[in-house]
Image (cartoon, helix red, strand yellow):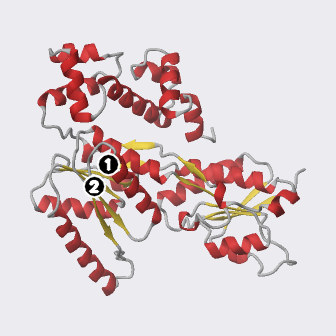
Amino acid sequence: MTSEKRIGVQMEIDQPYKRHVSIFAGIHRYARQQENWRLIVDDWAWRALPQRKGKELPYDGIIGRVSAEGIARANRLQVPVVNVLFRSADEDALGVFPDFEACGRARAEHLLARGFRNFGSLILGVDRANRLEASAFERTVGEVGYTSTLLHLEGPYSAVGDSDDNYRHWKRGKRQMEKWMETWKLPIGLYISDVDITRVLIELCVNRGWRIPEDVAIVAGTNEEELCTHPDPSLTSLEYPNEQIGYEAARQLDEIMNAPPAVRRRKPNSASDNILLPPVGIVARRSTDFIAIDDELMRRALRYIDENLGRPISIDDVADALLISRRKLTAEFRKNLKRTVAGEIQRLRIERVKRELYGTELTVQEIARRSGFGSLRTLNEAFMRVVGCTPREYRNSTHPFE
């Protein structure tokens, strides 16, 4: 029988953030597939390692949210580490993380598709992931000729401990938000890094008589379901690939532990090989349920496409439904969305396919039919061209444990 592998899991699951709990779930799913893995939940896993070589090691490998100091100690002792804490992503340890630039692009594309022309980002703290998302958001809208305004609140803003200093920071942050809002041109589409600060900003908008989403549309931070669905308006958010990160991190740790000793000594870990996983997708809710285009013709066209996306519609179908020429429809789409009619139909279909691949158990063939592609072959070709893999490969990457 293969000897037992003791794996220290350092995921801070006493803090029930989705990114902690879901990554832990992915790690656990991989471990259940291994006959010789024993997971030991230990938020001090790296500190349990001895200071010097020669003493018995408590773990064969460590996986989780590991600091720079922890990575350095593990490397000195040649204990394999796979890191999921982005703050220490540049340290000498293999890491598995969301592709934060792709996340920022997805947020911007969601708002662009709804016709917004004015944009802004609000990020909290010094988190580099938030800055990467905001930069990618700004670049994406810039590529089609628009600009985005940024408010960076440095905090801290937590009410934990009921600190007077934190409360003063909080009041100052609200004043900064109100001053920032004076610069907006409505309607505006926003990326806000945290769900809790999104709720505060919404109240400030309501106090000014601004409507969500007609005047201010918001894509909030991570998809924490309870926080995003209540109260009204529900918040559009982004689903990070948390469970996939946990599974892939565990798989990578297994590979490192099973590598020949000479290979492990030469290259115990490597930050240069960090693995970045794309977002699962945008979870659309009320806070972006609006088409911010004054042109009534375009609004009707987009509404028709949305209502008929499950049918194999073409540009001619849209033009006929609106009683206009194909040439005029093409010109309107290029002017308002900077893309073709066919391009927009395909983009929306691909997004629907991605949501159904992740969120349903429908077969790929059923999804092809429901998404208007008509056949599995047509879907496969379009999906490969746009996403870079087949629908089945995409589903496997988002549900690697099934």
> Residue 217 at what x, y percent from top left?
23, 49
Give the Cα separation between the discs numbered 2 and 1.
8 Å
Q: Above or below — where is 379 with respect to 242?
A: above
- Rendering quarter of residue 203: bottom left
Q: How many marks?
A: 2
Q: In the image, what residue occupies the spot 53% across and 58% down?
A: 21
Q: Is residue 284 visible?
A: no
**87 vs 34, nearest the viewer:** 87
Q: In the image, what residue occupies the spot 56% across and 67% down?
A: 12
Identify the amino acid type marked 1. Gly
Lower sequence index among marks 2 and 1: 1
Q: In the image, what residue occupies the spot 20% across and 66% down?
A: 180
Identify the amino acid type marked 2. Ser
Residue located beneath label 1 in the image: 142
Q: Residue furthest right?
A: 1
Q: Above or below — where is 283 with respect to 91?
A: above
| 385 horizontally vs 6: left or right | left
Residue located beneath label 2 in the image: 148
| 217 horizontally vs 381: left or right | left
> Residue 216 at what x, y percent from top left?
19, 51
Q: Above or below — where is 180 with respect to 2?
A: below
Q: Above or below — where is 67 with respect to 23?
A: below
SS category of the residue bearing label 1: helix
Do the CB atoms of the residues marked 2 and 1 lie less than 8 Å apart? yes
Q: In the image, what residue occupies the spot 63% across and 49% down?
A: 247
Q: Which mark is residue 240?
A: none
